[in-house]
């Protein structure tokens, strides 16, 4: 083998080893949950899950792996074999952000989960994540846009959000209380302005919804980004190790 070929071979080896080293250092943040954070199909635009803009907040050492899926509950996510693939690839130091409740709490849905089952499922996610030396983070369900006659935001997740808090407290799991934070945000926006955060469209405004759309559960791009920013702020408040990989703001040139 010529010196040129040896040099080329060593260069390739160096890049492969560097890439492997980067992969080993990279932390994956898995997002599991329902449609409020899932990746959306183009045909549903401008509907946007908060997990989509969330990917933009971190540097190259963090990989966001969004496994959330529309219409899923803590039970159906397991039954459909969506949790096991996450568990199989989970490595030490990875995070699992867990946000369910929207579909668990509705008794008329097939995805309904009793309060006892809901807590048991959350604990399963937590314990199995920890068994793989991963870091679970529990998130209360993000608020729906609903106001009472006096203009006060209604807590539609009161029971199931409290169950998440109980599981987090009893098992010393980091908790992001997105229910509370998102309700505060909607209250600040008020009845009319809060519509601009959700998938509200007039007839003819968007080709995906020729007859218009009034959706007080799913966000548009702005709403999703604001919810993702609430999650980011709580990551900072909890002082999770992820804070070290948050993208630094670009300083303006002097």
Image (tube, rainbow, N blue to C red):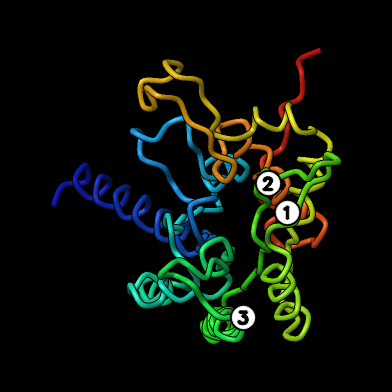
Between 74 and 149, the one nearer to me in the picture: 149
Q: Quadrant location of the C terminus?
A: top right
Identify the residue position indicated by label 1 in the image: 243
* On screen, residue 9 above or below 81: above
- Residue 28 can be seen in this image: no
Residue name at image x 46 percent, y 72 percent: 90
Identify the element where label 1 is drawn: helix
Identify the residue position indicated by label 2 in the image: 246
* On screen, residue 12 above or below 209: below
Count residues near mark 3 (Cα–Cα under 10 Å), then give few for <14, some for 14-19, many for 20+. Answer: some
Between 160 and 92, the one nearer to me in the picture: 160
Residue name at image x 75 percent, y 43 percent: 147
Residue name at image x 84 percent, y 36 percent: 188
* 152 horizontally vs 76: left or right: right
Work out which residue is located at the far front of the displayed protein and give it. Answer: 149
Rounded to the nearest angstrom, the CA distance separating label 1 from label 3 is 33 Å
Identify the residue position indicated by label 3 in the image: 115
Rounded to the nearest angstrom, the CA distance separating label 3 from label 2 is 35 Å
Q: Earlier in the sequence, mark 1 or mark 3?
A: 3
* 152 horizontally vs 20: left or right: right
Dot label at residue 196: none
* Relative image position of residue 172 (x, y in whole percent): 76, 81
The answer to whether the residue labelled 1 contacts the one labelled 3, judged by CB atoms less than 8 Å apart, is no
The answer to whether the residue labelled 1 contacts the one labelled 2, judged by CB atoms less than 8 Å apart, is yes
Identify the element where label 2 is drawn: loop
Rounded to the nearest angstrom, the CA distance separating label 1 from label 2 is 5 Å
Between 185 and 213, the one nearer to me in the picture: 213
Q: Earlier in the sequence, mark 3 or mark 2?
A: 3
């Amino acid at each position: 083998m010529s010196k040129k070929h040896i040099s080329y071979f060593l260069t390739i080896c160096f890049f492969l080893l560097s890439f492997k080293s980067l992969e080993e250092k990279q932390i994956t943040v898995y997002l599991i949950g329902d449609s409020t954070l899932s990746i959306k199909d183009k045909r549903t635009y401008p509907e946007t899950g908060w997990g989509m803009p969330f990917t933009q907040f971190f540097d190259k050492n963090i990989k966001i792996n969004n496994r959330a899926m529309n219409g899923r509950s803590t039970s159906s996510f397991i039954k459909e074999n969506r949790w096991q693939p996450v568990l199989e690839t989970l490595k030490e130091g990875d995070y699992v952000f867990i946000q369910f409740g929207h579909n668990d709490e509705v008794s008329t849905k097939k995805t309904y989960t009793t309060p006892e089952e809901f807590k048991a499922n959350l604990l399963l996610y937590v314990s199995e994540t920890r068994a793989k030396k991963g870091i679970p983070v529990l998130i209360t369900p993000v608020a729906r846009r609903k106001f009472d006659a006096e203009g006060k935001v209604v807590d539609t997740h009161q029971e199931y959000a409290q169950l998440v808090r109980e599981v987090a407290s009893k098992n010393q799991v980091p908790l992001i209380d997105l229910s509370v934070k998102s309700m505060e945000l909607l209250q600040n926006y008020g009845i009319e302005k809060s519509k601009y955060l959700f998938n509200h469209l007039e007839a003819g405004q968007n080709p995906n919804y020729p007859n218009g759309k009034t959706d007080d559960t799913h966000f548009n791009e702005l709403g999703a980004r604001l919810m993702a920013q609430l999650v980011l702020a709580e990551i900072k408040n909890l002082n999770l190790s992820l804070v070290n990989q948050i993208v630094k703001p670009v300083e303006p040139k002097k």
